[in-house]
Image (tube, grey):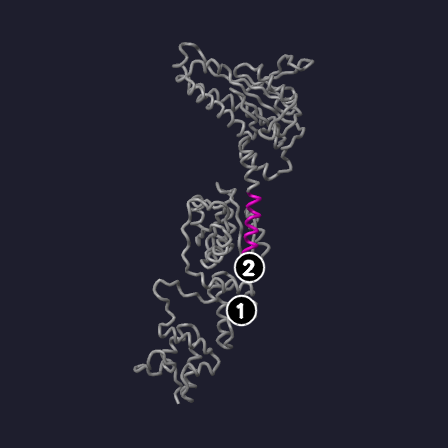
Amino acid sequence: MTRPTLDNVPTAAPAAPGRVDSPLFGELLLKLGIVTPNQIEEALALQSLNGQRLGEALISLGYVTREQIQSALGEALGLNAPPPGALPIQPPLGEVLVGLKYLTVTQLDEALAHQRRSGRKLGEILVEQGYCSYKQLYEGLALQGRAGRPEPEPRTQPLEGHHRVMVVDDSPLACAFVQDGLVSLGYEVVCFQDPYEALEQVNKVLPAIVLSDLDMPGLDGVELCRRLKEGPTRAMPVIILTANDNEAERVGGLRAGADDYVNKSASMDELAARIESVMRRTGETERMRKLFARYTSDAVVEEILKSPDSVVLTGEKREVTTLFADIRNFTGLADSLPPEQTVGVLNQVLGGLSDAVLTCGGTLDKFLGDGLMAVFGAPVFRSDDALRALQSAKMMMVFMGELRQKAEAEWATTRQGRPLTLELGIGINTGVAVAGNIGGAVRAEYTCIGDAVNVAARLCALAGPGEILVGERTVAVLPGHEAGFEELPPVRLKGKPHPVPLFRALW
């Protein structure tokens, strides 16, 4: 007797749709992935012997369950199709777990084959085989009803009192899981499946924090974090999410600048707690960044944030180099210019002088009318602070020369025939001073006070147009630069019992 197969069973006059003895029903079971061709062949052979329907034969052979047969019948009759406007059909649990990266495709295929043989529930098999945990299984079950749900349109501004979170994960199921969980806790969430698109849109979305999957094709979470931390968004906190707990990957993410590293199996409450913890730390760091950015260069700010133990905020004695710069003849210029032009010229000059201070890594202490005070050595101390101050002074002089050439014609039209040229006098001195926040509860400023600071101010007052006067200690801490100074006769300064050695910088 010829053994019947799908190829030699007549199909010219098939049974009515839905009958379980129809060969077409076997094809449907194959299409749905419930059985294999060999299992269908064995069931057809059994059917030819005892006259059972195909479905009953498959059940008696242990290849399918009655529930699977009923589901297949519903598929054949179109009973499982969603009504118009309804949400998409829930994806199979295995697909959800693969989408969450708790399971590989190979592991799913093995578990499904085991299920067809035993008829047991897929979840039980996955846990028994060690492919996923019960916690991951429950997360997958919770996600089944969320697939296909449309994402809300991102707002132009975050909700008041809530953080905006950007989630980057190539799995839409994982995005939906995190989004639903965080939204239920009061967060505003914007999701991206493409990490490159997330990089392009980050400045438009303006999230308070980024949650990134670790394993993504093309651009993984570590590289995404590195690019965020190297650009204008370097202050934006990043948490890396992963289904793995590999120490090397965790260390790599942290070295790339990640602020935290959270396993995907963590509860939503734990994830929210990690977000809040990172936001608190980042908020304090950003507060310090904004505070010091008003006084000093970005490079110094970064050094302060990296090495907070070297920062002086509350008051400490340390050796600093102080620079005072004062514009000569500015009063005469102000008398001959309209008020708005006077302010414009002053801002232009002080802006150039400030740039010289910040470029050389100094701290802009304060503006003094038509001059300024700068400190090198506080809040961050460097071994070459005196040299930085001297280089800053020379940059100021070069700037003033270029500014005179550029604006001479403009100012000449307003001098009413009087010769007037802006010049600069600078005083530099090194010595021990007290650095810290000085003032009261309402208003305070970070500054340095002490005799060494007073000497620098008096040297600035003595300096002629285009002259840089330097104290003895500054020259002493610059070995090898003696040829760059001209020794002048000692001078008497207010408050000093003896004449003070004096030097002029040759620039």
Q: Name the secondary structure under disc 2.
A: loop
Report x, y in % for residue 24.
35, 78
Tell me the chief SS of the magenta region: helix
Q: Look at 57% across and 53% down and name the residue there.
A: 250
Q: Nearer the viewer, residue 83 or 129?
A: 83
Q: Of all residues shown, which one is farthest toward the left?
A: 12
> What residue is disc 1 on?
126
| In magenta segment, residue 191 | no
The tally of labels here is 2
> What residue is disc 2 on?
265
**Real-space Cα separation, disc 1 to disc 2, in angstroms:** 16 Å
Give the label, 1 or 2, closer to the camera.
2
| Observer able to see residue 11 | yes
Relative to 411, residue 280 above or below: below
Relative to 178, residue 402 above or below: above
Q: Nearer the viewer, residue 207 or 326?
A: 207
What is the three-letter code of the residue carrying label 2? Ser
Q: Name the secondary structure under disc 1.
A: helix
Q: Which residues are magenta?
A: 268-282
Report x, y in % for residue 110.
50, 71
Q: Of all residues shown, which one is farthest toward the top?
A: 417
